[in-house]
Image (cartoon, grey):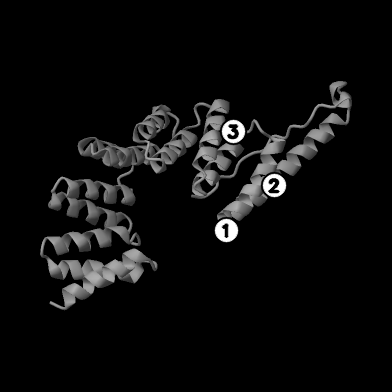
Amino acid sequence: MSIRTITIIGIFILSPILLLGCAGSSVTTTDAKSNARALEDMGISLVRQGNLRGGLEQLLKAVKLDPKNPDLNHELAIVYRDLKEYDLSLSYFKRTLSLRPKLSEAQNNLGTLYLLMKQWDLAIKSFQAAINNILYQTPEIAYNNMGLAYYNKGLYEKAIQSYQKALDASPDYSACHVNLGLVYEMLNRPEDAIDAYNKAIKYGAQNPSPYLRLGRLYYRLGKMSDASTMLKKFLSIAEEGSDKEEAQKLLETIESR
């Protein structure tokens, strides 16, 4: 997840001179803002390069200068989440929302933390809070994530409803079409699953996931030619990993028949 650009408003320890309102106070404020922003920019840059711990170090220095900045607390919550430090992430999400309760992006991201913690009901509550803000510009993301929570609860019809709402808002949401296909598979609706995966390919041709899903499904349905085509496409665009090894073995099984 990419780190958003955020604005730092510096704060500082009140000294006797500052309490007197001396002319030097504006300079000190400006210096604090400048220092915090420089630390923030460095932290964001490191996170984007994949150096989460290095970025975290700089963001923690920045938040000491501006502890009441909701955006900065939000970024720290995300980094801690991605480092799997869930308790620390939760504390920063709560701090963020205490400072700006209607920050829908934070509500959605808090929901993703609850997904990782397998606290499905709390996740749904957070996604709904994000959606309830009429000013939230990407409700399809929260609806898709809510679908994941319902899917993990085994409430497949509610998952479908959430995915459909996501797709109503953003019909070309490739990953959501994949998630919808998974639910249809669980409900033994293979034709609906195939349709969903094909839409995922239509709107995200370089997304390898639907090709693998289709390859597996066609194989189970005995459609070996279609399965082979999908698996070869998956192998041509997927990065190295266990899924690629699985696809190669399945393709070899098909070709050995």
**Residue 184 against residue 133 in the figure, above or below:** below
> Is 62 on the left or on the right of 236, as rendered?
right
- Disc 2 residue crowd, few under 14, some 14–19, many 20+, Cα 10 Å: many
Q: Residue at x 34, y 31 (%)?
A: 121
Q: Helix, strand, or loop for circle 2?
A: helix
The kind of residue tagged 1 is: Gln
Q: Position of residue 17 (x, y in %)?
A: 89, 26
Q: Position of residue 217 (x, y in %)?
A: 18, 59
Q: Which numbered disc, 3 or 2, marks the residue that appears first in the sequence?
A: 2
Is residue 45 something one can see in this rendering?
A: no
- Using the numbered discs, state the Cα–Cα distance from disc 2 to disc 1 in whole angstroms: 15 Å
Q: Which numbered disc, 1 or 3, marks the residue that appears first in the sequence?
A: 1
Q: List the single residue furthest toward the bottom.
A: 256
**Residue 113 against residue 185 in the figure, above or below:** above
**Residue 98 against residue 237 in the figure, above or below:** above
Q: Position of residue 160 (x, y in %)?
A: 23, 39
Q: Nearer the viewer, residue 88 or 234?
A: 88
Q: Position of residue 165 (x, y in %)?
A: 29, 37
Q: Which residue is mark 1?
A: 49
> Is 175 on the left or on the right of 185, as rendered?
right
Q: Helix, strand, or loop for circle 3?
A: helix
Q: Helix, strand, or loop for circle 1?
A: loop
Quadrant in the rendering for residue 75: top right
Q: Which residue is mark 2?
A: 39
Say if mark 3 contacts mark 2, CB within 8 Å.
no
Q: Which residue is mark 3?
A: 70
Q: Which numbered disc, 2 or 1, marks the residue that appears first in the sequence?
A: 2
> Is 126 on the left or on the right of 236, as rendered?
right
The kind of residue tagged 3 is: Pro
> Is 42 on the left or on the right of 208, as rendered?
right
Quadrant in the rendering for residue 49: bottom right
